[in-house]
């Protein structure tokens, strides 16, 4: 039995969704026979069952029952180019024509490495991996081997991959068995004292310069500056996980803040939509992996330099997501966020859109948000309802409220999104008053 007006509305939304999506339900039921919970990527599960997507084109997705959505999720930042971008398609077609799986170095990896080193100021040398998770594991390994120290400082609400998961504000049973020191994000004094306390045993400090999965919460500049100063003082390797945030300026958030880490990890869109990860940074740190040197650290990976990823990534970074395109896309994101927040303020609702540039996240609270713990204070049931209302309005966002712009999204789509949010406020915010009245 629903206990509140919001819960009752959610139950209704679930019923309408189930009735509207029989093919997705059938797909999900078949999937449960061969994958636990019918799922192979946890974030893509939502009750009562996730929608199955049949195809995508430009900024649109179509589900198995034929409904069209405007894609405001952009594959959790990996889909910056939209679906089937002609330049990426041409690069992939050319790569396929030349053959795959050489078991040898190729020229594309040199060109992509050059493009990455040119773009991101902290990266003097780079190595490729197959995922952001792997990139972070290798960066942490590089830091531990370089310093000869065991511990790694991470932050509550941080996410660095499937086995580096701190989104719940604590270590997770699935995490790689490192010796972690968990610090409070954006708490400059608290973190500084933890660094002082563990300085002799800390190999690395790793953080996202804006929490991505943790709700698009930017790090304050003074917090990042303190980390830079403390890491330098104690010889700790500062790692920026820019797997998501590298898109936020031509040179990532590090360039925007002009605060350079010792190492940077990348992923998502930089592979042009193919599986991708990279770690890079100071030449002396990365030289540990130079196989021509005695006692070099090994770094393996069958698909590290696979020609599909190298080709799509190079075409994307040099021909499509150019520095000019990055500036323009982030300006559009800032304008959209301003419009949405003005709407929330005008309607005097406890709702806001956080983030920077082309990454946004909705939160059902009007309190200032500086950490994932702050964000957890928002009304989660209402945000769940937001997800279902957006789907019903033909808008694809993350269940946790994440929104990422892609290049093909235009002004008309932005207007559609703002209108859907206005409808949500009109229809749903009264439910909170009903619940408050009943309490
Ligand atoms: N770091 C961050 C900040 C991420 O957002 C992600 C993926 N969401 C990862 C690392 C892991 O990347 P992948 O999923 O490619 O392993």
Image (spheres, rainbow, N blue to C red):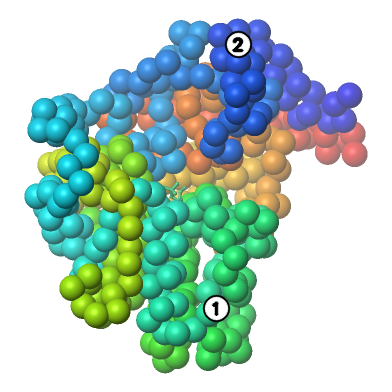
In the image, taking residue 245 as reference, residue 249 lies left or right, namely: left
Name the one closer to the observer, 120 or 281: 281
> Pointer 1: what residue?
151
Q: Residue at x 60, y 58 (%)?
A: 175
Q: Position of residue 189 (x, y in %)?
A: 58, 82
Name the one closer to the observer, 135 or 388: 135
Q: Residue at x 40, y 20 (%)?
A: 61
Q: Position of residue 50 (x, y in %)?
A: 59, 24
* Quarter location, residue 279: bottom left
Q: Quadrant of the N terminus?
A: top right
Label 2 CB, ligand 1: below 8 Å?
no
Q: Position of residue 227 (x, y in %)?
A: 45, 79
Q: Give the distance between the C-alpha atoms of the residues marked 2 and 1, in whole angstroms.
A: 47 Å
Q: Secondary structure at mark 2?
A: helix
Q: Quadrant of the C terminus?
A: top right
> Pointer 2: what residue?
26
Q: Position of residue 247 (x, y in %)?
A: 31, 51
Q: Residue at x 59, y 21 (%)?
A: 31
Label 1 CB, ligand 1: below 8 Å?
no
Q: Is residue 100 visible?
A: yes
């Amino acid at each position: 039995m629903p206990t509140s007006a919001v819960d009752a509305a959610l139950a209704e939304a679930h019923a309408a969704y189930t009735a509207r999506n029989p093919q997705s339900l059938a797909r999900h039921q078949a999937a449960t026979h061969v994958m636990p919970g019918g799922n192979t990527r946890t974030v893509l599960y939502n009750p009562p069952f996730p929608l199955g997507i049949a195809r995508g084109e430009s900024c649109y997705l179509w589900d198995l029952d034929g409904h069209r959505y405007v894609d405001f999720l952009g594959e959790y930042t990996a889909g910056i180019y939209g679906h089937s971008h002609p330049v990426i398609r041409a690069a992939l077609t050319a790569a396929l024509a030349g053959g795959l799986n050489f078991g040898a170095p190729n020229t594309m990896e040199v060109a992509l490495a050059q493009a990455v080193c040119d773009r991101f100021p902290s990266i003097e040398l780079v190595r490729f991996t197959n995922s952001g998770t792997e990139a972070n594991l290798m960066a942490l390994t590089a830091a531990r081997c370089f310093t000869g120290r065991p511990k790694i400082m991470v932050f509550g609400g941080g996410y660095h991959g499937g086995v580096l998961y701190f989104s719940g504000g604590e270590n997770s049973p699935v995490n790689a068995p490192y010796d972690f020191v968990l610090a409070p994000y954006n708490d400059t004094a608290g973190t500084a004292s933890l660094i002082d306390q563990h300085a002799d045993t800390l190999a690395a400090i790793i953080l996202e310069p804006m929490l991505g999965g943790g709700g698009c919460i930017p790090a304050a500049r003074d917090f990042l500056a303190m980390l830079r100063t403390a890491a330098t003082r104690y010889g700790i390797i500062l790692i920026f996980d820019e797997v998501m945030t590298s898109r936020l300026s031509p040179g990532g958030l590090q360039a925007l803040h002009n605060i350079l880490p010792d190492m940077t990890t990348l992923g998502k869109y930089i592979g042009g939509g193919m599986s991708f990860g990279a770690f890079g940074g100071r030449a002396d740190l990365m030289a540990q992996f130079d196989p021509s040197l005695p006692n070099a650290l090994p770094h393996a990976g069958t698909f590290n330099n696979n020609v599909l990823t190298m080709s799509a990534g190079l075409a994307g970074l040099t021909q499509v997501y150019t520095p000019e395109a990055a500036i323009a896309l982030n300006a559009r994101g800032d304008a959209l966020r301003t419009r949405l927040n003005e709407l929330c303020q005008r309607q005097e609702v406890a709702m806001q859109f956080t983030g920077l540039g082309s990454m946004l996240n909705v939160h059902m609270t009007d309190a200032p948000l500086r950490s994932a713990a702050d964000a957890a204070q928002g009304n989660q049931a209402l945000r769940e309802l937001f997800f279902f209302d957006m789907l019903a309005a033909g808008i694809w966002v993350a269940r946790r409220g994440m929104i990422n712009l892609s290049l093909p999204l235009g002004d008309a789509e932005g207007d559609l999104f703002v209108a859907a949010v206005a409808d949500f406020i009109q229809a749903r915010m009264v439910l909170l008053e009903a619940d408050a009245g009943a309490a």
